[in-house]
Image: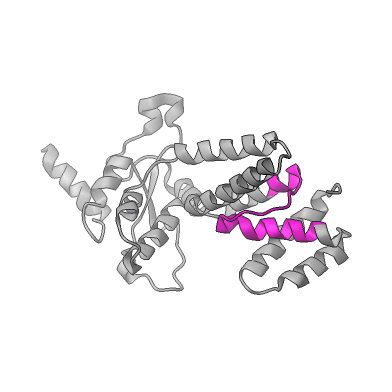
Amino acid sequence: MAKISSTQYEPVFDLGLQVQSGQLKANDAIEIVTKETGLNKASAKYCLDAVLAMPKGVEYKHTINIPATKYYLYRFEDSLTSVQFKFVLQSVDKHLEYYVAQGKGDQVTIRTLVDSYRAKLTLQAVYPDEVHEQTTEFTEGAVKQVTINAYERDPKARAACIDKYGSICKVCDFNFEAIYGSIGKGFIHVHHKVDIATIGKSYQVDPINDLIPVCPNCHAMLHTGKPAMSIEKLKQIIDSSNT
Ligand SMILES: [Zn+2]
Ligand SMILES: [Zn+2]
């Protein structure tokens, strides 16, 4: 494939999101890219195919260059929850398998990149909600739980919450860095305080009022009830068992 530059493959990502949400037709997106960036039609189509396939976890057949793949992974990691991002990695895996099966050799740089993203995902903590999610059938209730997970894991909402409250448990004051040193720095769970039953379709998470940093132990205890117990209630329980 001809050499393509960042000014050509980057706009495809945002146009691809518009195609995905039904705001734009694929052919129109390709036309915009070819007109505005000078990218040839075939390359524009291959880039768009990849952007559309990745979040669905399906294979794309045409190899896009290393910088473009890197950029799309970077953008998806930034905008998706870790559960959704796993599909993106799956899609790239499938492409790599296809490429090898064609006898074209291995794309070592991309494979290494996918492996490092995957390692990063497994380092992230398992949340109590996630455990429920894995054992629950795919009912409407389970769908709601997936949504809740997304709020608690949403990187931007998490960051805003930790920015405001710090990474010390708001129930028991546990400080990972104080106990574990540098490996514990910044480690904390973020709990979503809003009862799922009260959430409407247009709900938008408020990282300051709806999220709260808690340690994994307190997080698990909060989720022993449904809806989850309040922060105040759990604090009272700790206080009464300590006296
Ligand atoms: Zn705690
Ligand atoms: Zn929680």
In the rendered image, residue 179 lying in the magenta stretch gets the answer: no
Pick the residue in front: 12 or 57.
57
User: Splitting the image into 4 quarters, where does residue 136 fall?
Assistant: bottom left
Report the number of discs: 0
11 up-or-down from 102: above or below? below
Q: Residue at x 70, y 59 (%)?
A: 49
| Left or right: 87 as drawn, with respect to 177 | right
User: Splitting the image into 4 quarters, where does residue 149 fall?
Assistant: bottom left
Q: Position of residue 64 (x, y in %)?
A: 74, 49
Q: Is residue 219 visible?
A: yes
Q: Position of residue 88 (x, y in %)?
A: 58, 51
Q: Position of residue 109 (x, y in %)?
A: 69, 35
Pick the residue in front: 44 or 164.
44
Q: The C terminus lies in which quarter of the figure?
A: top left
Q: Is residue 171 visible?
A: no
Q: Residue at x 74, y 56 (%)?
A: 47
Q: Position of residue 240 (x, y in %)?
A: 12, 44
Q: Which residues are magenta?
A: 43-71
**What's the image's color scheme?**
one colour
In the displayed image of the protein, which residue is found farthest to the top? Answer: 181
| Left or right: 190 as drawn, with respect to 93 | left
Q: Residue at x 44, y 69 (%)?
A: 203
In the rendered image, residue 69 lying in the magenta stretch gets the answer: yes
Magenta segment, principal secondary structure? helix
Pick the residue in front: 164 or 97.
97
| Left or right: 173 as drawn, with respect to 12 | left
User: Splitting the image into 4 quarters, where does residue 143 fall?
Assistant: bottom left
